[in-house]
Image (cartoon, rainbow, N blue to C red):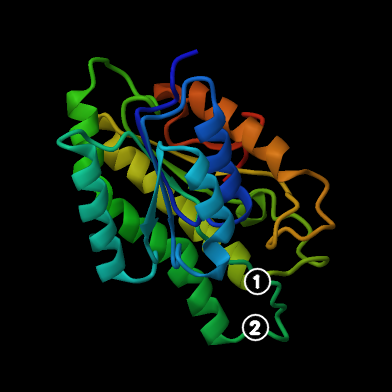
Protein backbone atom coordinates (compact mmCIF):
# COMPACT_ATOMS: atom_id res chain seq x y z
CA UNK A 1 0.00 0.00 0.00
CA UNK A 2 1.41 3.39 -1.00
CA UNK A 3 1.99 6.10 1.60
CA UNK A 4 -0.95 8.40 2.20
CA UNK A 5 1.35 11.34 1.47
CA UNK A 6 5.07 12.09 1.36
CA UNK A 7 4.66 14.86 3.94
CA UNK A 8 1.90 15.51 6.49
CA UNK A 9 1.39 18.27 9.05
CA UNK A 10 -1.02 17.81 11.97
CA UNK A 11 -2.04 20.67 14.28
CA UNK A 12 -2.99 20.00 17.89
CA UNK A 13 -1.01 16.77 17.88
CA UNK A 14 -0.08 16.52 21.55
CA UNK A 15 -3.28 14.74 22.62
CA UNK A 16 -6.46 13.02 21.50
CA UNK A 17 -7.14 12.63 17.80
CA UNK A 18 -4.07 14.63 16.77
CA UNK A 19 -1.68 12.45 18.78
CA UNK A 20 -3.30 9.27 17.47
CA UNK A 21 -3.10 10.53 13.88
CA UNK A 22 0.63 11.02 14.30
CA UNK A 23 0.99 7.62 15.99
CA UNK A 24 -0.84 5.68 13.29
CA UNK A 25 0.80 7.57 10.42
CA UNK A 26 4.26 6.83 11.82
CA UNK A 27 3.42 3.15 12.44
CA UNK A 28 1.87 2.53 9.03
CA UNK A 29 3.56 0.06 6.65
CA UNK A 30 4.44 2.93 4.29
CA UNK A 31 4.77 5.95 6.59
CA UNK A 32 5.13 9.50 5.27
CA UNK A 33 8.73 10.63 4.92
CA UNK A 34 7.93 13.73 6.96
CA UNK A 35 5.34 13.93 9.77
CA UNK A 36 5.23 17.42 11.25
CA UNK A 37 3.57 17.10 14.66
CA UNK A 38 2.65 20.56 15.89
CA UNK A 39 1.26 21.93 19.13
CA UNK A 40 1.50 25.05 21.26
CA UNK A 41 4.16 23.78 23.67
CA UNK A 42 5.93 20.61 22.51
CA UNK A 43 8.58 21.03 25.23
CA UNK A 44 6.12 21.42 28.11
CA UNK A 45 4.30 18.86 30.27
CA UNK A 46 1.46 18.48 27.74
CA UNK A 47 3.94 17.53 25.04
CA UNK A 48 5.37 14.54 26.95
CA UNK A 49 3.45 11.81 25.08
CA UNK A 50 4.32 13.41 21.75
CA UNK A 51 8.02 13.64 22.64
CA UNK A 52 8.05 9.97 23.65
CA UNK A 53 6.40 9.03 20.36
CA UNK A 54 8.80 11.09 18.26
CA UNK A 55 11.76 9.40 19.96
CA UNK A 56 10.57 6.10 18.44
CA UNK A 57 10.07 7.36 14.88
CA UNK A 58 12.65 9.41 12.95
CA UNK A 59 9.94 10.55 10.53
CA UNK A 60 8.25 12.67 13.25
CA UNK A 61 9.41 16.25 13.62
CA UNK A 62 8.02 18.27 16.53
CA UNK A 63 7.18 21.86 15.59
CA UNK A 64 5.90 24.62 17.87
CA UNK A 65 2.74 26.10 16.38
CA UNK A 66 -0.02 28.06 18.10
CA UNK A 67 -2.87 28.34 15.60
CA UNK A 68 -4.12 31.64 17.05
CA UNK A 69 -0.67 33.29 16.99
CA UNK A 70 0.38 34.45 13.53
CA UNK A 71 4.13 34.84 14.27
CA UNK A 72 4.11 31.28 15.64
CA UNK A 73 2.46 29.99 12.45
CA UNK A 74 4.99 31.81 10.28
CA UNK A 75 7.92 30.41 12.27
CA UNK A 76 6.45 26.93 11.81
CA UNK A 77 6.23 27.49 8.05
CA UNK A 78 9.94 28.34 7.99
CA UNK A 79 10.84 25.19 9.95
CA UNK A 80 8.71 22.96 7.71
CA UNK A 81 9.99 24.57 4.51
CA UNK A 82 13.58 24.01 5.63
CA UNK A 83 12.92 20.33 6.41
CA UNK A 84 11.21 19.74 3.05
CA UNK A 85 14.30 20.96 1.16
CA UNK A 86 12.53 22.36 -1.87
CA UNK A 87 9.60 19.93 -1.85
CA UNK A 88 6.05 21.00 -1.09
CA UNK A 89 3.73 19.96 1.74
CA UNK A 90 1.26 17.30 0.62
CA UNK A 91 -1.25 17.11 3.44
CA UNK A 92 -2.31 19.66 6.06
CA UNK A 93 -4.64 18.34 8.77
CA UNK A 94 -6.24 21.18 10.73
CA UNK A 95 -7.08 19.26 13.88
CA UNK A 96 -6.49 21.78 16.69
CA UNK A 97 -9.71 22.98 18.26
CA UNK A 98 -11.49 23.75 21.51
CA UNK A 99 -14.86 22.62 22.82
CA UNK A 100 -17.54 24.45 24.79
CA UNK A 101 -20.70 23.29 26.52
CA UNK A 102 -22.08 26.80 27.03
CA UNK A 103 -25.85 27.12 27.11
CA UNK A 104 -27.97 30.10 26.11
CA UNK A 105 -28.02 31.08 29.78
CA UNK A 106 -24.27 30.69 30.43
CA UNK A 107 -22.68 31.77 27.15
CA UNK A 108 -20.82 35.07 26.93
CA UNK A 109 -19.06 36.97 24.18
CA UNK A 110 -15.56 35.96 25.30
CA UNK A 111 -16.35 32.25 25.09
CA UNK A 112 -17.91 32.72 21.65
CA UNK A 113 -14.92 34.71 20.40
CA UNK A 114 -12.42 32.21 21.81
CA UNK A 115 -14.17 29.33 20.02
CA UNK A 116 -14.21 31.23 16.73
CA UNK A 117 -10.55 32.25 17.11
CA UNK A 118 -9.39 28.65 17.57
CA UNK A 119 -11.91 26.71 15.47
CA UNK A 120 -12.36 29.07 12.51
CA UNK A 121 -9.71 31.78 12.30
CA UNK A 122 -6.92 29.41 13.37
CA UNK A 123 -7.37 26.80 10.61
CA UNK A 124 -7.86 29.55 8.03
CA UNK A 125 -4.67 31.34 9.08
CA UNK A 126 -2.69 28.10 9.12
CA UNK A 127 -3.98 27.22 5.64
CA UNK A 128 -3.21 30.69 4.29
CA UNK A 129 0.40 30.62 5.55
CA UNK A 130 1.09 27.05 4.38
CA UNK A 131 -0.62 27.57 1.03
CA UNK A 132 2.61 28.25 -0.92
CA UNK A 133 3.99 24.88 0.22
CA UNK A 134 0.73 23.13 -0.69
CA UNK A 135 0.77 24.80 -4.11
CA UNK A 136 4.37 23.69 -4.61
CA UNK A 137 3.37 20.09 -3.83
CA UNK A 138 0.41 20.25 -6.24
CA UNK A 139 2.57 21.62 -9.06
CA UNK A 140 5.40 19.17 -8.46
CA UNK A 141 3.26 16.05 -8.29
CA UNK A 142 3.62 13.55 -11.12
CA UNK A 143 -0.15 13.01 -11.16
CA UNK A 144 -3.41 14.66 -12.07
CA UNK A 145 -6.68 14.88 -10.17
CA UNK A 146 -7.06 15.62 -6.48
CA UNK A 147 -5.77 13.46 -3.63
CA UNK A 148 -3.99 13.57 -0.28
CA UNK A 149 -0.85 12.23 -1.96
CA UNK A 150 -0.80 15.31 -4.21
CA UNK A 151 -1.96 18.26 -2.08
CA UNK A 152 -4.82 18.43 0.41
CA UNK A 153 -6.30 20.30 3.36
CA UNK A 154 -8.40 18.28 5.80
CA UNK A 155 -10.37 20.17 8.43
CA UNK A 156 -11.45 18.13 11.44
CA UNK A 157 -15.05 19.21 12.01
CA UNK A 158 -18.07 17.84 13.89
CA UNK A 159 -21.58 16.87 12.93
CA UNK A 160 -22.91 18.98 15.81
CA UNK A 161 -21.92 21.88 13.56
CA UNK A 162 -24.29 20.63 10.85
CA UNK A 163 -27.12 23.11 10.32
CA UNK A 164 -29.05 20.44 8.41
CA UNK A 165 -28.92 17.94 11.27
CA UNK A 166 -28.99 20.37 14.23
CA UNK A 167 -28.57 17.35 16.51
CA UNK A 168 -29.65 17.34 20.14
CA UNK A 169 -29.60 21.08 20.81
CA UNK A 170 -31.75 20.74 23.91
CA UNK A 171 -29.50 18.03 25.40
CA UNK A 172 -26.20 19.71 24.45
CA UNK A 173 -26.59 23.36 23.45
CA UNK A 174 -22.82 24.01 23.01
CA UNK A 175 -23.47 27.35 21.32
CA UNK A 176 -19.83 28.44 20.79
CA UNK A 177 -18.69 25.02 19.57
CA UNK A 178 -21.63 24.40 17.23
CA UNK A 179 -21.55 27.87 15.69
CA UNK A 180 -17.78 27.82 15.21
CA UNK A 181 -17.84 24.40 13.56
CA UNK A 182 -20.63 25.53 11.22
CA UNK A 183 -18.44 28.52 10.29
CA UNK A 184 -15.42 26.25 9.82
CA UNK A 185 -17.49 24.13 7.44
CA UNK A 186 -18.18 27.20 5.30
CA UNK A 187 -14.44 27.90 5.24
CA UNK A 188 -13.90 24.35 3.99
CA UNK A 189 -16.42 24.82 1.19
CA UNK A 190 -14.86 28.13 0.15
CA UNK A 191 -11.33 26.69 0.16
CA UNK A 192 -12.43 23.68 -1.88
CA UNK A 193 -14.00 25.92 -4.52
CA UNK A 194 -11.06 28.33 -4.67
CA UNK A 195 -8.23 25.80 -4.63
CA UNK A 196 -9.66 23.06 -6.87
CA UNK A 197 -8.09 24.52 -10.02
CA UNK A 198 -4.73 24.72 -8.23
CA UNK A 199 -4.80 20.96 -7.66
CA UNK A 200 -5.51 21.17 -3.92
CA UNK A 201 -8.25 19.06 -2.35
CA UNK A 202 -10.16 20.31 0.72
CA UNK A 203 -12.55 18.22 2.82
CA UNK A 204 -14.18 18.34 6.26
CA UNK A 205 -14.11 15.20 8.41
CA UNK A 206 -16.31 14.39 11.41
CA UNK A 207 -14.28 11.99 13.60
CA UNK A 208 -17.25 10.68 15.57
CA UNK A 209 -17.90 11.06 19.29
CA UNK A 210 -14.55 9.93 20.63
CA UNK A 211 -13.09 9.24 24.08
CA UNK A 212 -10.76 12.25 24.34
CA UNK A 213 -10.38 15.21 26.70
CA UNK A 214 -12.92 17.04 24.57
CA UNK A 215 -15.22 14.07 23.91
CA UNK A 216 -15.02 12.80 27.52
CA UNK A 217 -15.11 9.20 28.71
CA UNK A 218 -18.86 9.08 27.99
CA UNK A 219 -18.09 8.86 24.27
CA UNK A 220 -18.78 5.45 22.69
CA UNK A 221 -15.74 5.22 20.40
CA UNK A 222 -12.01 4.88 21.07
CA UNK A 223 -9.61 7.32 19.49
CA UNK A 224 -7.79 4.38 17.85
CA UNK A 225 -10.91 3.28 15.99
CA UNK A 226 -11.79 6.82 14.92
CA UNK A 227 -8.34 7.49 13.51
CA UNK A 228 -8.22 4.15 11.68
CA UNK A 229 -11.40 5.21 9.95
CA UNK A 230 -10.21 8.75 9.25
CA UNK A 231 -6.99 7.55 7.62
CA UNK A 232 -8.89 5.07 5.45
CA UNK A 233 -11.21 7.87 4.32
CA UNK A 234 -8.27 10.20 3.60
CA UNK A 235 -6.72 7.55 1.38
CA UNK A 236 -9.91 7.39 -0.68
CA UNK A 237 -10.43 11.15 -1.18
CA UNK A 238 -10.55 12.36 -4.77
CA UNK A 239 -11.90 15.08 -7.04
CA UNK A 240 -15.44 13.86 -6.27
CA UNK A 241 -15.05 14.35 -2.51
CA UNK A 242 -13.29 17.71 -2.49
CA UNK A 243 -15.66 20.09 -0.73
CA UNK A 244 -17.48 17.23 0.97
CA UNK A 245 -18.41 16.82 4.65
CA UNK A 246 -17.72 13.17 5.56
CA UNK A 247 -17.65 11.13 8.74
CA UNK A 248 -14.90 8.71 9.82
CA UNK A 249 -16.55 5.95 7.82
CA UNK A 250 -16.77 7.97 4.61
CA UNK A 251 -20.50 8.70 4.87
CA UNK A 252 -21.64 12.06 3.54
CA UNK A 253 -23.12 14.49 6.09
CA UNK A 254 -25.47 17.42 5.45
CA UNK A 255 -23.98 20.87 5.92
Label 1 neighbourhood size at 10 Å, few (<14), some (14-19), many (20+)? Answer: some
Q: Which residue is more in the foreground, 214 or 80?
A: 80
Residue 215, quarter of picture: bottom right
Q: Which residue is at a point 73% across and 49% down the rendered structure image?
A: 210
Q: Which residue is at a point 76% across and 44% down the rendered structure image?
A: 222
Instruction: Tally the marks.
Output: 2
* Any part of residue 57 in sight: yes
Q: Which residue is at a point 81% across and 67% down the rendered structure image?
A: 170
Query: Mark 2 = which residue?
Result: 107
In the orientation shown, which residue stands out farthest toward the front? 55
Return the x and y of residue 166 as percentages of the image width and height: 70, 55
Return the x and y of residue 236 as percentages of the image width and height: 51, 21
Mark on residue 28? none
Q: Is the residue 44 above or below the residue 129 in the image?
A: below
Asked if marks 2 and 1 touch (Cβ < 8 Å), the reply is yes
Query: Mark 1 = which residue?
Result: 100
Please identify, in this view, whether the residue under mark 2 or under mark 1 is nearer the observer.
Answer: 1
Q: Is the residue 63 above or below the residue 206 in the image?
A: below
Amino acid sequence: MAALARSVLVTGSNRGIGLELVRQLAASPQPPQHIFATCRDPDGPRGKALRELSAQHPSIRLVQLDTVDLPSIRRAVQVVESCLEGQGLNLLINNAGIGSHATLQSVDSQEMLAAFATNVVGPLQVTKEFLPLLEKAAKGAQKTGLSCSRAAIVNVSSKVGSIGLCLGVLEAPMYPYRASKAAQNMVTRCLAAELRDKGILCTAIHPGWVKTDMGTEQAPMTVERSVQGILAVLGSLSQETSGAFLDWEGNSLPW
